[in-house]
Amino acid sequence: MLKRVVQVGFLLIGGTLGVLFLPHLFSLFSFTTRPMIDNPYVAAVLGAIVLYLLSIFLTEPIVNFIKWMEDLLLKAPIFDLLFGTVGLIVGLSVAFLVSFGLSSVEIPIITSILPVLLSILLGYLGFQVGFKKREEFINAMVSIRNSGTKKKDGGETARPKDSLNKILDTSVIIDGRVADIASTGFLEGILVVPQFVLTELQHIADSSDTLKRTKGRRGLDVLKRLQTEEGPQILITDEDFADVAEVDLKLVRLAKSMNGLVVTNDFNLNKVADLHGVSVLNINDLANAVKPVVIPGEEMHVAVIKDGKEHNQGVAYLDDGTMIVIEDGKTHIGNMIDVVVTSVLQTSAGRMIFAKPKNGKTDTNGRKLERWGS
């Protein structure tokens, strides 16, 4: 179909050029009579025949070029095309205004050639500026919009987080807790899943490693659950950044371009997003926030299961997976003991409790019993 369209285009262009230029071309030659050459229909037919013969050799390269351009434009992110087109329009508008101002100059080279050169140069520069400065334009528009929401008393109303696009990364999808949070209604707005995250999930699901394959399939099941259950809307976007190889940086760039935030449980991505000024919802932070509060001086009954990194330390775990580092607990490995909390360290990577044995006694339910106070 495209090949036929190109051939018809050659015929139309050939007919037009024949009507416009063939009479002048034949006027250069001395003919006694030129009744057929002066006929516009004859000139149009001759021009169409000449261009059609040329199309036999040119159609295939032109069709291939058009298909290549089509694939290139379809793969380009929508914001790249949008801002590039706006820059192109601005550049051509400036070229037109400059050419209009020079139209009064009676110099042939300026009035005929310079406007074409200006259109090509300024159009190209406008497209490049719009394409490469798109993020700065977006940030500037966001800043202007936010400044317009100031209250009359001088205060500023921030955009509520539930109205922001929430971009899911691979780790939080595989983790699966985001689906439980969304089903309870605590996570609102639009959940955005980039296509490059889906591709990474698919590669994990197709891995030869059994554990990775299980994680990847679980992540795909979580996405299916998010789509089918009532809750936030799921948006799958094809926007990608070909100049960035790392998925984490792509997520940060996407969050900036969509004026959204990243939902993750990856500690490193959390830090990278903070450095780029992108807001983050960390599932681990939420999990830590809803855990029971433990304060120094509180007593706990735990099982010491292994030794710690430091000398003579023991390690125990709560039911929710919180690690308890027990001072002088190495000798109690395999025993149930009462401990006293000395301090609590809580970060985005998780919570860690430091404790020490209560009076250094153990209670092993019959294996190594000692009575408190003896």
Image (tube, rainbow, N blue to C red):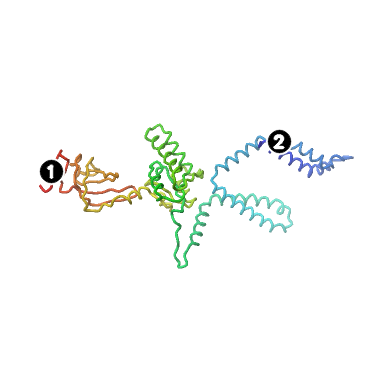
Pick whichever, 282 or 252, lies toward us. Answer: 282
Residue contact between numbered discs 1 and 2, judged by CB atoms under 8 Å: no
Mark 2 nearby-residue class (10 Å; few <14, some 14–19, many ≥20): many
**Rendered image: mark on residue 55:** 2
Residue 302 appears at what percent x and percent y?
22, 44
Residue 32 appears at what percent x and percent y?
89, 40
Quadrant of the image occupied by residue 3? top right
Of the residues shown, which amino acid type is indicated by label 1?
A: Glu
Residue 199 appears at what percent x and percent y?
47, 39
| Extreme residue toward the bottom, this view | 153
| Extreme residue toward the left, this view | 374
Q: Which residue is drawn at 18% across and 42% down?
A: 332
Q: Badge 1 is on which residue?
A: 370
| Image height of 263 relative to 146, above or below | above
Lateral position of residue 179 relative to residue 296, left or right? right
Q: Residue at x 47, y 67 (%)?
A: 152
Measured Cα–Cα span from mark 1 to mark 2 = 99 Å
Q: Is mark 2 on a helix, strand or loop?
A: helix
Q: What element carries label 1?
A: loop
Query: Which quadrant of the figure contains the N terminus?
Result: top right
Lateral position of residue 320 relative to residue 222, left or right? left
| Extreme residue toward the top, this view | 208
Sequence order check, earlier mark of 1 and 2: 2
Residue 188 appears at what percent x and percent y?
43, 51
